[in-house]
Every structure is written in C-alpha cells, then in structure tokens.
Image (cartoon, rainbow, N blue to C red):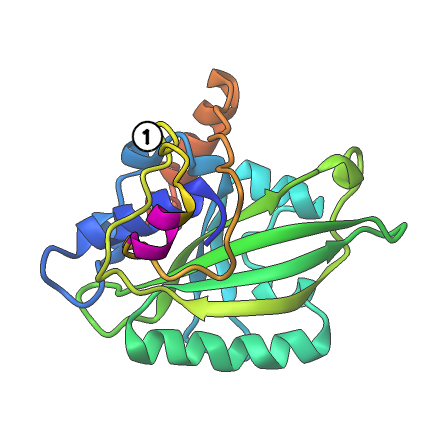
C-alpha cells in the first residue's frame, strides 16, 4: 500500500476483528474513522460479477460525478479489469484478507491519475463475509481531476495485504543516513506487504465540518443501509 489512509483503514479493520477472521459490519463506527469517512464505501459482494455499492462517502461519489449507492462497483472499470477484479474479490473473501488495488483512472478527455483502492472483507450479522469496507485514494498529482470525473479505471496491480508485521511509522522522523558499511549489515526493517514502495506518505485530508456532517447523515440516516447494519 502506498497511501497512509489505506494503512489506517486496514489497521482499523484489523482492530475490529477482536480475534475473529473478519469484523462484522455492525462493528464499524463512523465516528472512529471520521477523517476518512468521505472516501469510505461499503460493497455488497454477494455476486462477485456485480458487487453493489451499499453506500459511499461524498468524496468517492464526487470522483465519478454520481450518487454511487445502488450502482455496480465494476461499472467504472474496463471489461478486462472487471473480470480480473471479480476473481480477486472472490479470493479476498476466501482468504479473509484485505485486497489492495492499483489502477489508472481516466477522465473523459483522457486525463489520467493513479488510484489506490483497498477492499477489506466484513461479515454481516455474524455470517460468512459477503461485503467489503473499502476506500479509494488518488495518488500523486490530482490536477487531471480538477473539474473532471473518472470515466473508467484500468487495473494495473494488486496484492493481498498481510498483517503479521507492524505498520510503517509514517509520523516518525526519518532515520539518519546509513554509511555504506551500515547498509551492508543493517537488517531489513519489518513492514506491511506493499504493492509498491512510495517515497513519501500522503497527508490525511481533513474534511470540512459541513461535509463531515453530510457524510455522517448518510451513514446514520433513516434507512437501515445508512446505519451500516443493513
């Protein structure tokens, strides 16, 4: 994983498990991830060929220019990528491990951005996992999306995320430079399995209060879906 927020979501998912293979959707507390909430979404993957958005944060919807709730997750992926994604999501559910996707998002006028998407399996009402809590983040320069939406995505990489090693310490000061001798003898530091290394961490985007209120309302509205328990 490249983005700090991806690590934060997977870390939260892991803490919610409390000894279980996967957490249950009802365990998710929107207040605990309020800084990430506008990028978070939940998929119903009962059908891997047609995973459906149960709900999606405002920033995710804005990326595609539509309300995503009730739409097909694969509708914004090119056909070949969609076939691969169906298989990857099936394996993620079977392994009960989060999945990290690296893709290229293309705008209608052929602008391109790099996108990281994390999908972490969750159960519903204590059964086998049939849903994903996910989040997508634009990596690097988001200028091509200024005033534009993502027309489709092309999958360029994927990895299942293992959690048997500690998360990188993004907020720690950089280590001192190593001499050539130290480089030869220094043991490899533990880290989460990454899709690809990244020279610097992205900064968490703090959402304005009014946006946060609208997203919380979507999670806690009158319907059962919006309470993360449907």
In the image, 76 versus 138, the foreground residue is: 138
Can I make out residue 230 in this image?
Answer: no
Give the quadrant of the N terminus: bottom left
Residue furthest out toward the front:
181
| Percent of width and height locating residue 27 | 21, 49
> Viewed as shown, does residue 155 lie left or right of 19?
right
Residue 28 location (% of width, % of height):
26, 46
Q: Nearer the viewer, residue 2 or 132?
A: 2
Query: Considering the numbered disc 1 on the image, is that residue within a helix, a strand or a loop?
Result: loop
Q: Position of residue 76 (x, y in %)?
A: 68, 62
Could you tell me which residue is drawn at 71 percent across and 44 percent down? 65
- Image quadrant of residue 122? bottom left
Question: In the rendered image, which quarter is residue 123 located in?
Answer: bottom left
Magenta segment, which residues?
181-186
Q: Residue at the spot x=50%, y=28% of the render? A: 205
* Residue at position x 33%, y 36% in the image: 33
- Does the magenta-highlighted stretch encompass residue 42? no
Q: Which residue is mark 1?
A: 172
Name above or below for residue 89 compared with residue 222.
below
Q: Is residue 226 left or right of residue 53?
A: left
Q: Is residue 21 visible?
A: yes
Q: Residue furthest left?
A: 19
Question: Would you say the magenta stretch is mainly helix, strand or loop?
Answer: helix
Across and down, in percent, residue 223 comes to 38, 45
Quadrant of image for the C terminus: bottom left
Structural crowding at the residue carrying mark 1, measured as other residues with C-alpha within 10 Å and reported as few (<14), some (14–19) or many (≥20): few
Compared to 143, does 226 lie above or below?
below
């Amino acid at each position: 994983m490249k983005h700090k927020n991806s690590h934060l979501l997977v870390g939260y998912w892991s803490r919610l498990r409390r000894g279980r293979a996967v957490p249950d959707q009802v365990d998710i507390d929107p207040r605990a991830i309020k800084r990430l909430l506008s990028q978070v979404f939940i998929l119903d993957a009962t059908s891997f060929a047609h995973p459906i958005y149960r709900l999606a944060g405002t920033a995710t919807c804005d990326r595609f220019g539509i309300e995503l709730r009730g739409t097909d997750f694969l509708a914004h992926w090119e056909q070949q990528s969609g076939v691969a994604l169906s298989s990857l999501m099936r394996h993620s559910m079977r392994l009960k491990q989060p999945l990290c996707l690296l893709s290229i998002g293309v705008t209608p006028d052929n602008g391109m951005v790099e996108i990281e998407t994390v999908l972490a399996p969750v159960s519903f009402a204590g059964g086998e996992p049939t849903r994903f809590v996910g989040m997508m983040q634009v990596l690097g320069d988001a200028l091509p999306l200024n005033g534009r939406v993502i027309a489709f995505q092309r999958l360029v990489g994927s990895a299942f995320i293992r959690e048997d090693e500690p998360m990188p310490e993004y907020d720690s000061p950089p280590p001192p430079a190593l001499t050539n001798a130290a480089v030869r003898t220094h043991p490899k530091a533990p880290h989460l399995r990454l899709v690809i290394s990244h020279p610097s961490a992205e900064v968490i985007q703090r959402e304005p209060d009014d946006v946060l209120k609208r997203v919380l309302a979507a999670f806690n509205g009158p319907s059962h879906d919006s309470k993360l328990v449907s």
